[in-house]
Image (cartoon, rainbow, N blue to C red):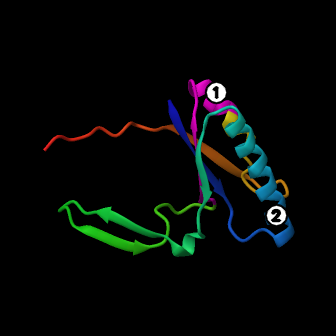
Amino acid sequence: MRYMMLIYSREGDSTAEADKALAQQHQAVMDEARRRGIFQGAEPLQPTGTAVTVRRSGKGEALITDGPFAETKEQLAGYYILDCENITEALEWARKIPTGCLGQEGCIEVRPIRPMTTIQA
């Protein structure tokens, strides 16, 4: 089953040197996942200042607002998609994914990906 690991961390708390170290840590995890044949994809996201959220009102109207969908101290920073045997393996991988530099707090949300079904017209 494919699992998405959503990476949450704090924005703006790093230096160029710290960013380089973090990128190297991510590269090591991605390289290991590739070697094991479970790597599906991983990318960082632009800062939350570039986000736009679309919500549906009770009347079905689209309400568009600038910014991320949640108000938290940690922002969605990127993701991994890994094809794991089960949730136990997915959690093992989540423990390896860095959330920030210099002991920065953060979290990884692990969610199974629901397969898309083809709708016949």
Q: Does residue 56 appear to the left or right of 96 in the view shown? A: left
**Mark 2: few, some, or many residues within 10 Å (few <14, many ≥20)?**
few
- Segment colored magenta: 74-92
| Displayed quadrant of residue 63 | bottom left
Q: Residue at x 81, y 55 (%)?
A: 24
Q: Residue beneath label 2, please?
A: 20
Q: Residue at x 61, y 56 (%)?
A: 43
User: Given the image, on which type of amino acid does mark 2 rest?
Assistant: Lys
Q: Nearer the viewer, residue 32 or 87?
A: 32
| Displayed quadrant of residue 65 | bottom left
Q: Residue furthest left?
A: 121
Q: Residue at x 51, y 39 (%)?
A: 111
| Displayed quadrant of residue 40 | top right
Q: Residue at x 20, y 61 (%)?
A: 60
Residue 70's disc number: none
Q: Nearer the viewer, residue 47 or 69?
A: 47
Please tell me whether residue 25 belongs to the stretch shown in magenta: no
Residue 101 in view in this figure:
no
SS for dot 1: helix
Please tell me whether residue 78 belongs to the stretch shown in magenta: yes
- What is the x, y in percent for residue 42? 61, 51
Residue 43 in view in this figure:
yes
**Mark 1: few, some, or many residues within 10 Å (few <14, many ≥20)?**
few
Q: Residue beneath label 1, please?
A: 89
Query: Is 47 situated above or below 104?
Result: below
